[in-house]
Amino acid sequence: MIRMRRLRTKEAIRSLVRENHVRREDLVYPIFVIEGEDIKNPVDSMPGIFQWSIDRLDEELERVIEAGIQAVLLFGIPAHKDEQGSEAYNDEGITQRAVRYIRQKAPELLVIADVCLCEYTSHGHCGLVCGHEILNDETLELLGRMSVSLAKAGADVIAPSDMMDGRVEYIRGALDEHGFTNTPIMAYSAKFASGYYSPFRDAAHSAPSFGDRRTYQMDPANGREAVRECENDIAEGADIIMIKPALAYLDVVKEVSHRTNYPIAVYNVSGEYSMIKAAAGNGWIDEKRIVMENMVAMKRAGAQIIITYHALDVAGWL
Ligand code: PBG
Ligand code: ZN
């Protein structure tokens, strides 16, 4: 008889045949930085996650470094929003100042800067708006300016999350033109129009004031199109591609991992985090066990990089 159980008899043999592992180095931790002073504002829908003002950021950076996390993904929340999202590409904007601060405070930390307009626009959309239409080509120039401004501030990696067509090529051109030929682009390539983002929109104050994001983010029903999105971003010059959300889209991760040798990141998004925190808070699930199961599932599907709000907890459990 083929006895599969022979290799399960004790931990030593189970670990010998274990196929996938989660490492601290795989993890990226998102941080929200908000304009203002003396702010450590808990995000109600995301227990353990806060909005930080720059003057209090040390506390969070210390936790990150102590946990052995080496990469953070930065989101800025400006005080002033307008139609064009001007603060996004202001060299003195909240995100640029936060990047500079982290650079100087924790030079060994990899700073990945999210590039998108929705936290900065009064209408909350990821691009320029005309009537009820989200403009594509007109938005590219602003994304280019934002990317260059963040690279100038010291961002190590530029991560466009807007889902405008052609933005990777445009941003690559803008970075190169300004001498940032060595700054990689981690593209949110297959980003789905998902209900799992709603806690993030509380955290980042980025909910659209009208309509939704379905004219630029992907239809959750489409796996083949997701492969095309990844292929397009690679053709445009992306260095790392990302699939987002993670858990409901691991089939896409698997498929893409078979078709490309580029590094793949997954974004284990806010809603995925909140559901676990809520269930764990009620004592209904074993948080550690379920989080670690999800982490290894993302690795098994083919992701190398895991962006997750659980990063500090996971690092503590490893
Ligand atoms: C902004 C952006 C979003 C997320 C990352 N960047 C929200 C959105 O597209 O509405 C979601 C992250 C999360 O839910 O944790 N473009
Ligand atoms: Zn956006």
Image: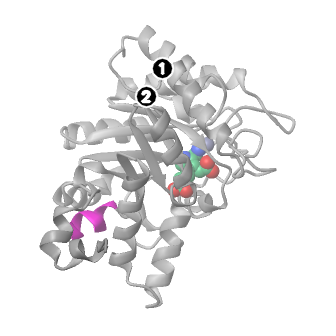
Q: Quadrant of the C terminus?
A: bottom left
Residue 237: image tag:
1
Picture quadrant where residue 295 is located:
bottom left
* In-front residue for pair 134/57: 134
Place of residue 301 in the rendered image (x, y in percent of width and height, measured from the top left)? 44, 52
**Residue in view at x 20 percent, y 70 percent:** 14
In the rendered image of this protein, does residue 172 appear above or below residue 195? above
Q: What secondary structure predominates along the stretch shown in magenta?
A: helix
**Residue in view at x 52 percent, y 66 percent:** 272
In the displayed structure, does residue 256 sit left or right of residue 82? Answer: left
Residue lying furthest top in this view? Answer: 177
Residue 45: image tag:
none
Place of residue 244 in the rendered image (x, y in percent of width and height, measured from the top left)? 54, 49
Q: Amino acid at mark 1?
A: Gly
Q: Which residues are magenta?
A: 311-318
Please say whether residue 313 is one of the residues in the magenta stretch: yes
Question: Which secondary structure, mark 2?
Answer: loop
Q: Amino acid at mark 2?
A: Ile
Residue lying furthest front in this view? Answer: 1
Q: From where the camera sits, is residue 43 visible? A: no
